[in-house]
Image (cartoon, rainbow, N blue to C red):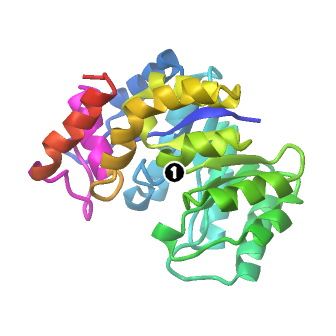
Amino acid sequence: MIRGSIVALVTPMHQDTQGVDWPALKHLVDWHIEQGTNSIVAVGTTGESATLSVAEHAQVIRVIVEQAAGRVPIIAGTGANSTSEAIVLTQAAADSGADACLLVTPYYNKPTQEGLYLHHKAIAEAVAIDQILYNVPGRTACDMKPETVMRLSAIENIVGIKEATGDLERAAALIAQRPEGFAIYSGDDATARELILLGGDGDISVTANVAPKLMSQMCAAALAGDAVTAAELDSKLEALHRDLFVEANPIPVKWAVAELGLQENVLRLPMTTLSAEHHELVRAAMSSAEII
């Protein structure tokens, strides 16, 4: 089971071409491993999956897997609102050597709970790679209910869920009902510490893009049941957890990673760069975490 601080990695891009900045991407992988990040998610929401072509999507996964070279597990974001497309992306990730895939609930088309079950079942049956469900109704307009999660957990290669609602009561219920070996990850940085202390397995994190060492230490303390240390560490991260969402993710976090000198501050339309009025707010949050 993958546990701990799992960064939902940004995808660096060039200002002039809008293409992926491959050297910067490779450097980010090395930096995260050096800083103690436990696992990397390639091409999730934070990695701008919505604006990468299928070919780029597959290549980003392949490059991250190759650069990590087995040092940490790589989870590939391969969800789509078309089941057939999700199967293609998931197969590409498996072929690239990813350790697992992260599959967001189909967005926009609003499937029923039965549709969600059949969608994920079909992908799991089509591609023999570990698969993690991803529930983020604030973005998808589709909420996977706990009972559907439990139905899917019976499928051998569906091994966990990223629960990004921030609802700790729901998280506690999932933790209590899950079968052995089924992971529960936070997808909400602000409540991740509490979810892990409830018995969860880690945090698939935006904040880890800019404070990887502190996030890794906080998750490790929470996993060890050291609530006091985890709270002390998390208090330094509180402003980042909040202010990295002052505009839609990944707008603020890409600006912050650029402030660290790790990439250019470039997003593809329709995403735009962070509004100037928020620069000092995010910079202050970085200062609170003692990273600048």
Q: Residue at horizontal 33%, vertical 40%?
A: 239
Residue under numbered circle 1: 188
Report which quarter residue 255 is drawn in.
top left
The spot of residue 242 in percent (x, y) is 35, 48
The spot of residue 58 in percent (x, y) is 53, 48
The spot of residue 31 in percent (x, y) is 43, 20
Q: What stretch is highlighted in magenta?
A: 251-276
The spot of residue 57 in percent (x, y) is 48, 50
Q: Which amino acid does label 1 sit on?
A: Asp
Q: Could you tell me which quadrant the N terminus lies in? A: top right
**Label 1: how many Cα within 10 Å (few below 14, some 14–19, many 20+):** many
- Residue 204 shows in the view: yes
Q: Is mark 1 on a helix, strand or loop?
A: loop
Q: Residue at horizontal 89%, vertical 52%?
A: 179
Closest to the observer, 247 or 65: 247
Is 266 contained in the magenta span?
yes
In the displayed image of the protein, which residue is found farthest to the front?
Answer: 228
* For residue 289, side relative to residue 169 (left or right): left
Closest to the observer, 150 or 68: 150
